[in-house]
Image (cartoon, helix red, strand yellow):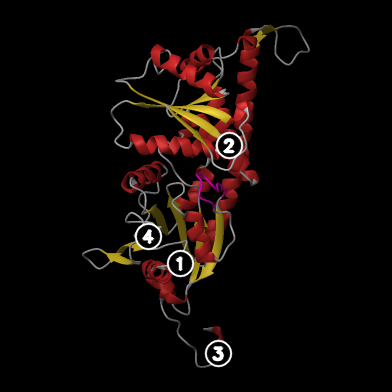
Amino acid sequence: MQDRTTAGQAAPAKTRSAVLVCLDFGKDDGFVESTEEIARLAESAGVLRHVIVQGKRQRPDAALFAGSGKVEEIRAAVESIGAGTVIFNHHLSPVQERNLEKKLECGVMDRTRLILEIFAQRAKTHEGKLQVELAQMEYLSTRLVRGWTHLERQRGGIGLRGGPGETQLELDRRLIGQRIKSLKAELEKTRQRRDVQRRARSRKDVFSVSLVGYTNAGKSTLFNLLTHAKGYAADQLFATLDTTTRRIFLAEMGSRGGQVVISDTVGFIRDLPTSLIAAFRATLEETVQADLLLHVVDSASPVRDMQVEEVNKVLAGIGADKVPQLLAYNKIDLANEGKGIEPGVDRNEYGKIFRIRVSARTGAGLAGLRGAIAELAPERMRAPAVVSPIHPELA
């Protein structure tokens, strides 16, 4: 059991302390990195102090997920730091969550709900808030199965919100269903507006690049470097959620071309909740419709290959796996155990660029990245202009 307090913080209140539960089922080669990741997720959600409880099992317990002995250990950890919440680095069924709350006498959340909490805190735009609320409503709808005894009381009589004999549980389920329908309708309007904008860019022959990658790989920092934007970027998981789009000019594409639209999208993570992927589909369609995916990879991460694989899984799930992809190995100044690696461009046996080595923090390799994007643009967008002898200013 490990006790950690975030440095530089005041003494945490009870609601700011949590017990993190990480169980090894022998199927995850990156168990250590997964444990570190859930700790960072908890800190991103506002947890100032946490205790980590680990264990090994062959399979989850049907009733308590962790088994009765491990639950007693978790309960002792809760009492030792006065934790208000227990966070499982796994997906819990509604029954398991309810049973654990009874046994531990405190709030229990799984990995899915924790990520939803972070998204709810970070969403800034109207569209982002709608997407997060939709994911939360769909998650909550699966928890309305005898989750609370007060929901089982019947509501009778004319003039009440529910019909005669309608239970509170049925009423809540119906209200959540109505809200989900309303949110989907609003997001559909947003999707249609995005379609209009994409068609306009397509008619103007604008080359579109979408940044994708594992959360905290440095996408937003690289986006700011490329576009000279001042978007929020921080060394934390899911620092930004809302898609930001900027237009830049690349002289490397020729005098007639050079118009590039770059979009910074939400970062991905292992076991990203399917409800979030569905809710953010309107935003992620920027990725599906892009001409090029700039896949940003944290080259300093010991599990970068796993992170690349997880991102590609999500891309395949949203239908973006056929979009041309350029790997951008970021944080080269921190790679190789802090010794760093040289910026540069890597080509395959056919001479085509497939990877670029850059540092968004120092700017190393930026010129090579701009050149790589220009080289991968379609020929029609980077051909030199034909100068008219009569009206050269119209060329």
Disc 1 to disc 4, how far (Cα)? 10 Å
Q: Which of marks 2 and 3 is in front?
A: 2
Please tell me in which quadrant of the rendered image residue 106 appears. top right
Assess disc 2: are there few (<14), some (14-19) or many (≥20) residues with their C-alpha within 10 Å of its C-alpha: some
Which mark is drawn over residue 363?
Answer: 1
Q: Is the magenta stretch mostly helix, strand or loop?
A: loop
Residue interval drawn in magenta: 234-242
Assess disc 1: are there few (<14), some (14-19) or many (≥20) residues with their C-alpha within 10 Å of its C-alpha: some
Does the segment drawn in magenta span residue 237? yes
What amino acid is at disc 4? Ile
The residue furthest right is 159
Of the pair 362 and 115, the residue shown nearer to us? 362
Secondary structure of the residue carrying numbered label 1: loop
Circle 3 residue: 391
Please tell me in which quadrant of the rendered image residue 246 appears. bottom right
Circle 2 residue: 46
Sequence-first disc among 1 and 2: 2
**Where 183 falls versus 84 (above or below)?**
below
Circle 4 residue: 332
Does the segment drawn in magenta span residue 315? no
Q: Which residue is drawn at 60% across and 40% down?
A: 9
Secondary structure of the residue carrying numbered label 3: loop
Of the pair 175 and 270, the residue shown nearer to us? 270
Q: Where residue 110 sits in the image (x, y, percent)?
A: 48, 27
Assess disc 3: are there few (<14), some (14-19) or many (≥20) residues with their C-alpha within 10 Å of its C-alpha: few
In contact (CB < 8 Å): disc 2 and disc 3: no
**Where 190 falls versus 373 (above or below)?**
above
Question: Could you tell whether 234 is left or right of 32 in the image?
Answer: right
What amino acid is at disc 3? His
**Where 82 falls versus 311 (above or below)?**
above
Sequence-first disc among 2 and 3: 2
Please tell me in which quadrant of the rendered image residue 228 appears. bottom right
